[in-house]
Every structure is written in structure tokens, then in C-alpha cells.
Amino acid sequence: PVRRLEALGEVTAADRSLLSGLRARAGSHDEALVEIETALNEDPTRTDDWVRRGELLEADDVDAALASAEACLNLDRQHGAAWALKARCLARLPDRTHEALKSATHAVALEAGGWTMIMLKSEIQESIGSFTAAEEGLERALTAHSDDPDLRAAIATRHLERGRLTEAQ
């Protein structure tokens, strides 16, 4: 259907964004990336498309993924998914730990990134020696999201790995 719309000259950036998502879910990574970049060329103000582009690039090109997160945040400083993407990217780069922590903090505050972002924030805090802050953050998250089985399992696993059997229960 999108190709027919293209022939009529009626394809919008939103159409391309939708097609990108469909192609990504179908496993056509390169085609999804082409579609999302075309959508962004047509309308660079679409914040979710910047995040989608970053997520598509994240595994292979962390710098380009980070640039996409920044582009989104330049448009909307309260975009939680962009903060989460930025945190994941920065956490993989040398000497960017403090920036990664700031980004993870924003993402968690905006309730973005789910349990994996909560755990990433805690791991970053531990990596810079903020063990108490890491534990307190996990306790707050567990209180706020007590019904999240993935978060509960991740925290329990973390306690088990550290030999803290009582806390793991």
C-alpha cells in the first residue's frame, strides 16, 4: 500500500514511520532504517522517529544512536525514551559514566525504559561507588512497581549474585 501511495505522491513521514516499524518487526533492519531516515528527511521534528532511528542503530553504531537521542532531546527535553536511549549509549562509551547516570536518572524519573533502565541506573551508580544510592533507588523502584515481575526478578537475581539470600526472597 505504501508503494501505491508513493506512486501517487501521497506518502507522508508518518506513513514511512509506520512502515519502518513494520519492517523492523519483520526483521528487515536495513529497510526499516532507510524508511525512518527518509521519514526524518521529510519531517525532522518527529521525536519518536529520532528515537526509533537510534534504536535501529544502537547495536551497530552507538555514536549515531547517541546523535539520534540528542536530536530528539533537542526537540523535546522531556522525551523519556530518548533519555533511556542516551543512557544506554553513554553506558557503553568509555569515560561517559557520569553522563550516562544523568541520562538514566532522567529516564527513570520520566518512567521510561522499564525495569532494564532502573537496573542500568543502579549498575552505573555502583560503578562509580554510589552503593547506597544504588540500593535505595532499587528499594524505591520496588515499592513503586511492586507488581512488576521482571523488576522483582532482576532485583532478586542481583541480591543472589551478591550472596544476599535474605534480601533475594
Image: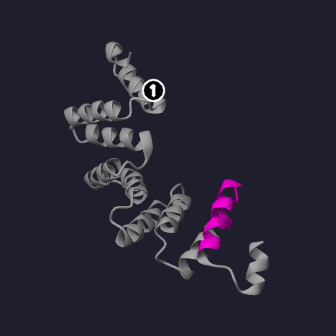
**For residue 26, what is the image quadrant?**
bottom right
What crowding class fits label 1: few (fewer than 14 Cα within 10 Å), some (14-19), or many (20 or more)?
some
Please say whether residue 20 is one of the residues in the magenta stretch: yes
Figure disc tally: 1
Q: Nearer the viewer, residue 158 or 84?
A: 84
Residue 108 screen position, x and y as percent? 34, 47
In this rendering, is residue 161 above or below 137? above
Q: Is residue 8 left or right of residue 142?
A: right
- On the image, the x and y values in percent for residue 73 come to 36, 67
Q: Looking at the image, which residue sits at the far top?
A: 166
For the point 54% across and 76% down, which residue is it?
40
Residue designated by label 1: 153
Q: Main secondary structure of the magenta part?
A: helix
In terms of secondary structure, where does tag 1 sit?
helix
> Could you tell whether 156 is left or right of 31 in the image?
left
Name the residue type under label 1: Ala
- Indicate yes or no whether the magenta region holds residue 81: no
Task: Identify the image's colour scheme: rainbow, by chain, secondary structure or one colour.
Answer: one colour
Q: Is residue 134 above or below residue 42?
A: above
Toward the viewer: 57 or 145? 145
Span colored in magenta: 14-32
Can you say which quadrant of the picture contains the C terminus?
top left
Who's the residue at 38% across and 72% down the image? 75
Picture quarter with the N terminus: bottom right
Q: 37 left or right of 162?
A: right
Residue 89 versus residue 73 in the image, above or below = above
Among all residues in the image, which is located at the extreme bottom?
Answer: 9
Residue sitting at x 41%, y 60%: 82
Q: Position of residue 67 (x, y in %)?
A: 42, 68
- The residue under the point 43% across, 30% down is 147
Measured as percent of width and height from the top left, residue 94 is found at 34, 53
